[in-house]
Each structure stands twice: as C-alpha cells, then as structure tokens.
Amino acid sequence: MIIKSHLHFIEKIIEEDIKNGFSSEKIRFRFPPEPNGYLHIGHVKAIYLNFELGKKYNAPVNLRFDDTNPIGEKIKFTDSIKKDIKFLGFKWDQEYYASDYFQQLYEWAIELVKNNKAYVDNLPKAIIQFQRKNPFESGINSNYRNRSINENLYLFEKMKKGFFEEGTCVLRAKIDMSSSNMNMRDPIMYRILKKKHHRTKHKWCIYPTYDWTHGLCDYIEQISHSLCTLEFENRRPLYNWYLDQVCEKNKIRPKQIEFSRLNLSYSITSKRKIQYLINKKIIQSWEDPRIFTISGLRHRGYTSIGIKNFIQEIGISKRNNIIDTSLLEFKIREHLNKISPRVMVVLDPIKLIIDNYSSNKIEWVDSENNPENPRFGHRKIPFSKYLYIEKNDFLEKKRKEFFRLSIGCEVRLKNAYIIQANSIIKDSNGKIIEVHCTYDPKSKSGKKENIKKKGKIKSTLHWVSIKHSIPINIYIYNSLFLIEKTDKNLNQYINPKSIEKIIGYAEPSIHKAKKGDHFQFQRIGYFYVGTTKKYNKKLIFHKTVSMKDQWKKINDKNKKIEL
C-alpha cells in the first residue's frame, strides 16, 4: 500500500504496519478516559483521532474507563463522558472498564512475584520517593527489595485480604533503580485503598496503579495501536516491560504511539484545578460555560461540527505548542454563520426618536433570516417612531474614524431608512437619554433609487422598536483568566468580568426561540438558547462567540511579518 504525503504521522505508521504484513482486520483502537472528572477540549483531539482512524480502517474503537482509583471516581463522570462522546457524533464498539480486569491483573502480579520481579515494600511513601533520587544519580535499593518469593507472596495475599492499613505497604516491580528513566525505578504496582469502588464496591482493598493497568488492558482487549499524548512517552519503556512479562506469542502486542496534546491559550484543562475552581465557587460546576470542558462548551453553544473542524484544522503532530483560542472561536463562528438565523437585539439601549415619523404608524420591514442560506427565508420586523439603538453607536460629537451616528451625520437603520441625528436630551446628570433624528422617507432599504445613496452611508445600525421589543436574559462570557497561561496562583488571575448578566431587548420574532436554538444577534455575536432550573426553566441566551474574527487578524499580522 502506497503511503501518501497528506497522511499524518500516525496514519503513516499504520500504513507501514499493513505494508509489512499486519492484517488490517486486526486493527483496533480505544479511548481510555479516567472517570474522575468531565472531559475537556484536550480530550477531543484524542477522541477525534481514535474514532476517525476507526472509520478510516473500518476498525472497532472501544470505550474503556481506566477506573483504578476509587478516590474521586464517580458514576456521574462516567455518564458525562459517554454523553460528550455522543455529542461529538461518535459511537464506540464495546464499553469496558479496567475494573473488569482486576482479577486478571492480580493474577499477573502474582506471577511477577513468583518470578522474583515484584516485591512488597513496607517503606513509607516519602522514603520510597527519596530513594528513587533523580535522573542524574542512581536510586537506592529498598531494604525490602530482596525479600524471598514466599514472603512476598504471603504479604501480598495479606494485603489483598485487608490485614494491613493504608500506607503501610505497596507492591513494587523489581526493575532497575539505576535507570535514567525514573519510571523504571521499581514503580508501584499496587497500593492499599480501603475505599468503596463505584463498580466493584468493597470487593477489593488493593488497587492496581494506572501504569500497571493501562498497557495491560490494551493487551487484554487486543488493541493494535495504543494512541496517547506525549507525556506518556517516558512511560513507554515501563509499559513495554510489563507487556514483556505477560505477552503470548500468538497475540497482538499493542504498539504505543504518542502525539502532542492540545494546549489552548487562556484556559485550563487540569481536572484538579477545575475542581479547585468549583470548590472555591469561582465557577458553578464542570458544565460552566466559562471553562473548556466539552459539557461547558456545549452549554455555551459550541457545535460538535465546529469543534471537530477545529481539531481537523490544527492536525495531528508530535510538536507541543499552545493554540490560540481565537482559532477555535473562528471554527465555531464559521459553522454558526451557516446555521444561525439572524435577529436584532439591543444590549445597552439608548432611546432614538424619529421626529418626522408618525407616532401612529407601524411598518413591517422585510429581512433575510440568513443571507448564507436562502432556505431560511424572510421575516417581518416592526418599525416605529420610537426605537432602541446601542448606546455605543452614538456620539454627541463626531470623532475621526467613528462612522456611526452623531449629530449632523447619517446612518442607515438595517432593513429600513436612512436617518440623521439632530439633537439630544440629557438628564440632570448630563447623561444622554434620548437622540432625536429625522428620516428620509424615500430611502427605504431595497429600493433601486437608493443604491447610489447607499454607497455614501458608511454605517448600518441594528435597532428594535421599543413598543414591540421583548426583554431577554443574556449571559455574556469573557475569558476566565487575565493571562494566557495559568500554572499557579489561579486566584490572582481570575477575570472579575468573566461573566456578565444583562437584560437585552429583542425584536418580536425571538418569542419563537426554544432551548437548543442558535441565533446571530446582528453586529454583536452568536448566541445559544439554554435554560436554568433556578428560575423555573427561564430561557437564557448564552453568548457563544463574538462577531469579531480575532483569528483572521492574527493570520493577517503573521503574513505581514513573513513578507
């Protein structure tokens, strides 16, 4: 089979394996999350990679939960993970759990003890860590490393039966305390945890470590290509050593291949840090729209197609880097632009009065629901003497490069008329409360005679008729953090304006909105309709992304630098 240049490096490896005689019918993949938190945007890359490769090679993809630690693992996390994978449009072949294999893993551990390749160590955790030293000096052998095989079998059995307290002993692999790879310095295989497991309940009081479990589960399931992120590269020798102890010649030995993880600017994906934010009540939950869990993005209105287009855009490689969040927003905006009907909504209103328009007159102007797709059709919007426009669309005194409304200047009201501002009214504090203007009755949008004049008008404003406007609850989201990368001191960099709750005023067509709908608020951004249990399932319009294309600006800037 010819390896084509457009294949990413993992596809090239698989193609080479097939070329060298590996049967394509034996190709199998898996996605192996730990059920101790919600999935985040980084997991999407691994999900996308495994399931798309499954499609390409017509190979099964298992969903396996590596549930080796009863502390923090919950059924709600398992359920959320399955929901997120379905949201992304993927379907797994078989559902497995590492806990399904606890007995087999235990039996293999006994074989290692019998072969003098594992021993029970009674040293405290801190001493074990100290004796492992660092990559530049050899570790120190434990005093218990040379226990007899029979003594180790006896002690390991007592560990299993609950005779010892937590922290009093562990089972360690006997490998090489002088290895430059710290993972090979007699790693822990089993520890005592007298905790209830969400699946096995109280059947076990010793639990296998992730490192002992992960690669062997791949072997049990006969996964051909075990794909993981680069932080597992140093663990590959350890996983291979474990496989060397149990693999049979006639079975598939999983091939581990590492790829770069997805790092996104102005975000955190650490489960520990997310839980910290929840505990400190900085965010509401794992589903908070301000964080980059898949559930959070879904509740903010990110679409599965937009997210997958983003993953496809950044590609699969071995090079670690930080991806600008604006690229993700660009891909979401790109998809929403195609599927979102347009509506006019004013977020920060100022009253506009058309002095020469009759107070008894109501016109229903015609507007396209989505110029990108004629099948969306048209809608009618009421136009009247009294309107709301955005406060920042008006300046009393015109400034250079300000092309919106100011005294003596003209703008077009979208789908309606050209107006000119003539005067203002202020309150006792000097705040503008009304803008008075006149309109040109002959300038109605769409008339052929207005084509020439339209070119002279540099700005078009959105608006709503005050009488017909519908108040709506809007949540505006900004970056949760004030800096691009936050490793420590999370509290110090929290953005106090990461969420703003306001009342907006929408055109009457918004009354048809229902949960799950997407809209483009013209000139503002894309919004998603959600609900809240707290207020009797009241509709909330969540801002998904703005209209501004920051990614295009970054690309244009980079191109100028290259030139």
Image: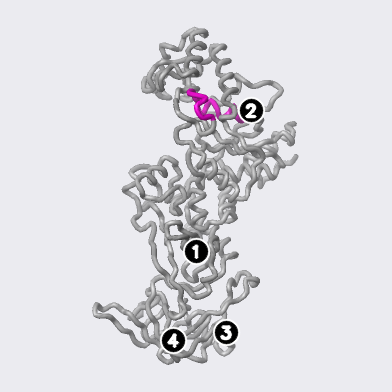
Disc number at residue 454? Answer: none
Dot 1, how many residues are within 10 Å of its Cα: few (below 14), some (14-19), or many (20+)? Answer: many
* Mark positioned earlier in the residue sequence (3 or 1): 3
Q: Does label 2 or label 3 sit earlier along the sequence?
A: 2
Q: Residue 385 has which mark?
A: 4
Seen at 48% across and 25% down, the residue is 183
Marks 2 and 1 close (CB-CB < 8 Å): no
Using the image, tell me which numbered label, if any, was put on residue 527. Answer: 1
In this view, the residue in front, 236 or 197, is: 197
At 40% from the left and 80% from the top, the residue drawn is 405
154 vs 476, nearest the viewer: 154
Give the residue displayed 50% in from the left and 64% down from the top: 526
Q: Is residue 33 above or below residue 493?
A: above
Q: Quadrant of residue 142?
A: top left
Quarter of the image for the N terminus: give it: top right
Q: Which residues are magenta?
A: 200-219
Residue type at tag 1 = Phe
Q: Which sits earlier in the primary sequence, circle 4 or circle 3?
A: 4
- Looking at the image, is 177 positioned above or below residue 215? above
Q: Nearer the viewer, mark 4 or mark 3?
A: 4
Q: Which residue is mark 2?
A: 220
Label 2 and label 1: CA atoms lie apart by 46 Å
Q: CA distance from mark 4 to mark 1?
A: 28 Å
Picture quadrant where residue 10 is located? top right
Of helix, strand and loop, which one carries label 4? loop
Mark 3 neighbour class, 10 Å CA radius: few under 14, some 14 to 19, many 20 or more: few
- Tell me if label 2 and label 3 are in contact, CB under 8 Å: no
Give the x, y percent position of residue 93: 67, 40
